[in-house]
Amino acid sequence: MKKKWISMLLATSLALTLAAGCGSDDTKNDGTQNAADQENGGNQAAADTDQDKDNLIEEVSGSVYYLNFKPEQAEQWNDLAEEYSNETGIPVTIETAASGTYESTLKSEMAKSAAPTLFQVNGPAGLASWKDYCYDLKDSAVYKNLKSDDFALISDDGQVQGVAYVIETYGLIYNKDIIEDYCEMEGAKIKNASEINSFAKLKEVADDMQAKKDELGIKGVFASAGMDSSSDWRFKTHLANMPIYFEYQDDKLKTTEAVKGTYLDAYKNIWDLYITDSTVQPTMISGMTGEDAAAEFAMGEAVFYQNGTWAYRDITGNDVDDDDMGMLPIYIGVGDEANQGLCTGSENYWCVNKNAAEDDIKATLNFLEWVVTSDKGRRILSDEMGFVTPFSTFTDEYMPENPLVAAANEYIDSGKTSIPWVFSTIPSEKWKNGVGSALLEYAQGTGDWEAVKSAFVEGWAAEYKAVNQ
């Protein structure tokens, strides 16, 4: 079911049609209607319009305070809030947590008297800490417009505690133009990018391109694996998804209180490739940022850049044309690589604070309804934020123009198996930080891979126990 809905969301060839719910009178006024009829008709039209508005969004007082998780969309959320406030008169405050600080910021803000009325969790593991704060959304418009319960966090007793609002995809973004230049070189290991369909082939090509980086005019094959808070999540979370997913597949799990680390050697192999065939030396990655990596790729200084569809707006408009952006799966040498797709899912679930004042809860529910049903709200989410959403109201005209989304569509259309985002089951942010620190120490030569294994396996068990006591 999940794959079916993801396919429907990502495949631009599937058109979704909204049923027209309101009739209209297209008969032109031929001038014979008397003034009284015109006045009555005008009053009735105004009443009908007001009634339609009441049916869509119940008018209430109150205010909205949203603690936003995504710094890259902070400006767009502020614009959206301003549009809504201008239209309805309801105050909407948007605060955005700095990258890597959302959980700590949320804890701090929730302790205040004016706490967020709208916040988010990253999935089942994140919900564990906040489930007692979640208003039941089962009767809300935002839930009723959700295409599938696959994109809702539902408790055992049927309460809808969270609703996903964006479906995203990540992998290895690559520069088609540089790949084509490489393929024309004598001794190239591939004839085109489609031949990179396994970790073995990726490593063979990357090693050869790194040796020829001066001829190719690049600083390195992979954009820098920065390990500051603006970038380390790409590796301690998104890359870590790969060994976790394949272990879950083997053991037929959806979550676990203790991982075994079955595929940590494969995790090591891809990490070694990232930090060796790179734009910078491994000893430098502690000071490299997400902006550094995006800039290296955007300026044509790197061939590959591990990131997702959301990164498009960070790299477009520079030296890499939209037509030259592609995306490959993250191969780690495990599973059926020839049929492997990209990593698709969500870690962005809206939750409404049930402890907020009743008027503020109603105002927040109305705001969410407007976001997913109004033209302005949908345009900002799709066109300006670049979101692919799981709501039935986002028909084809609300699909973002994004070559990375197009690449994701191609993998779905070709029948490749998407890798789900199982990292939402990671027990805590502390676990991620432990793995990130160990990865950095290993890369710098001040630690060994055994410490990474320990942080991954023993750290998981300890954090699961601590969170679920």
Image: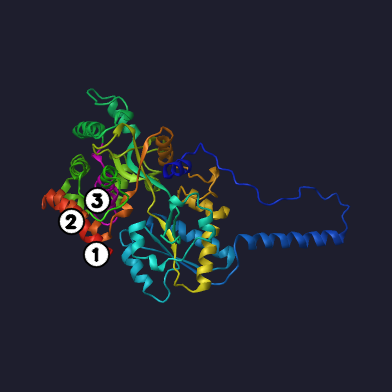
Q: Which residues are magenta?
A: 218-243
Q: Left of 19 or right of it: where is 98?
A: left
Q: Amino acid at mark 2?
A: Glu
Across and down, in percent, residue 394 comes to 53, 48
Across and down, in percent, residue 409 comes to 43, 38
Determine which residue is flagged by label 3.
226
Across and down, in percent, residue 100 comes to 30, 59
Q: Residue furthest bottom?
A: 113
- Is disc 1 surrounded by few (<14), some (14 to 19) or many (20+) residues within 10 Å? few
Q: Nearer the viewer, mark 3 or mark 2?
A: 2
Give the structural element (helix, strand or loop) at label 1.
helix
Q: Amino acid at mark 3?
A: Gly
Q: CA distance from mark 2 to mark 1?
A: 12 Å
Q: Which quadrant is the N terminus positioned in?
A: top left
Q: Is residue 242 magenta?
A: yes
Q: Are the two marked residues, 1 and 3, in contact with CB atoms closer than 8 angstroms?
A: no
Determine which residue is flagged by label 1.
466
Q: Is residue 28 magenta?
A: no
Across and down, in percent, residue 386 comes to 45, 48
Q: Amino acid at mark 1?
A: Ala
Q: CA distance from mark 3 to mark 2?
A: 25 Å
Give the structural element (helix, strand or loop) at label 2.
helix
- Is disc 3 surrounded by few (<14), some (14 to 19) or many (20+) residues within 10 Å? many
Q: CA distance from mark 1 to mark 3?
A: 29 Å
**Earlier along the polypeptide chain: callout 1 or callout 3?**
3
**Earlier along the polypeptide chain: callout 2 or callout 1?**
2
Determine which residue is flagged by label 2.
458
